[in-house]
Image (spheres, helix red, strand yellow):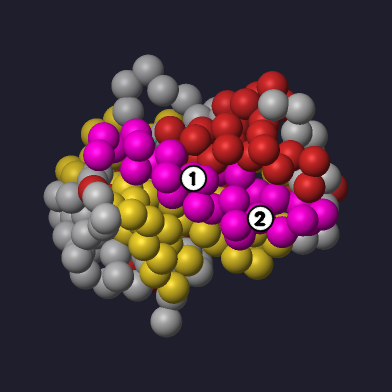
Amino acid sequence: MQQDQLKRAVAEAALAYVEKGEILGVGTGSTANFFIDALASIKHHIPAAVASSKATAERLQRLGIEVVDLNAVDSISVYVDGADEINAQLHMIKGGGGALTREKIVAAVAKKFICIADASKQVDVLGKFPLPIEVIPMASAYIARELVKLGGKPILRQGFMTDNGNVILDTHGLSIVHPTELESILNQLTGVVTNGLFALRPANVLLVGTKEGVKTVVAS
Ligand code: 5RP
């Protein structure tokens, strides 16, 4: 099966987790886009959605789903999003699409995080995918030096600005054996807005697309 077919399969499987009449959180990226397209069939059950990026907001609105500001809602029942890598503990690297900050905020609010991914995203140890780190532009050289001290090789994502007006350092070479610890360390660096480790708030459920079908992994 092609990777896109696997992405579509997990996106459709995620519809079962959408709670009728509840505000839905929606992620960013190609797998999340398959999910948005699949939402068309149940959009009458969704009063509104909170989007994790401008691109997702536009795609939802094109489908006729109302998009509301996170500050206007008290809670989000379910957040559905993809990942760049995910381990057995459902810790993730996210931010390949550059939306990590808003994704992490929506995930923090959501009661349940459903990660949708094709099997290529499953890893034993996080870190082969360069870790995206969103940084205030004036701090980028300082943060890059700090990341080198931590053993990383940061590369400024060229020609890219996040929805929040910041830059991204894609950080290669980190073998992330203790994801929660590294997430906390990176959060302490002054000038870092968000790092792409989603370990302190991991996914609750992983729907993974394999040649044998969609498999469900629930966080222990
Ligand atoms: C965007 C993300 C995406 O979830 C991640 O990059 C996966 O994308 P895709 O579904 O296109 O493989 O974190 O910031």
Q: Residue furthest front?
A: 212
Residue under label 2: 18
Q: Is residue 165 visible?
A: yes
Q: Residue at x 42, y 45 (%)?
A: 9
Q: Quadrant of the N terminus?
A: top left
Q: Position of residue 34 (x, y in %)?
A: 49, 35
In this picture, is 108 found above or below 37? Answer: below
Disc 1 marks which residue?
11
Q: Pick the residue in front: 130 or 26.
A: 26
Identify the magenta region. Answer: 1-28
Three-letter code, disc 1: Ala
Q: What secondary structure is found at the residue carrying circle 2? A: loop
Nearer the observer, 91 or 130: 91
Q: CA distance from mark 1 to mark 2?
A: 11 Å
Location of the C terminus by quadrant is bottom left
Label 1 or label 2, whichever comes before in sequence order: 1
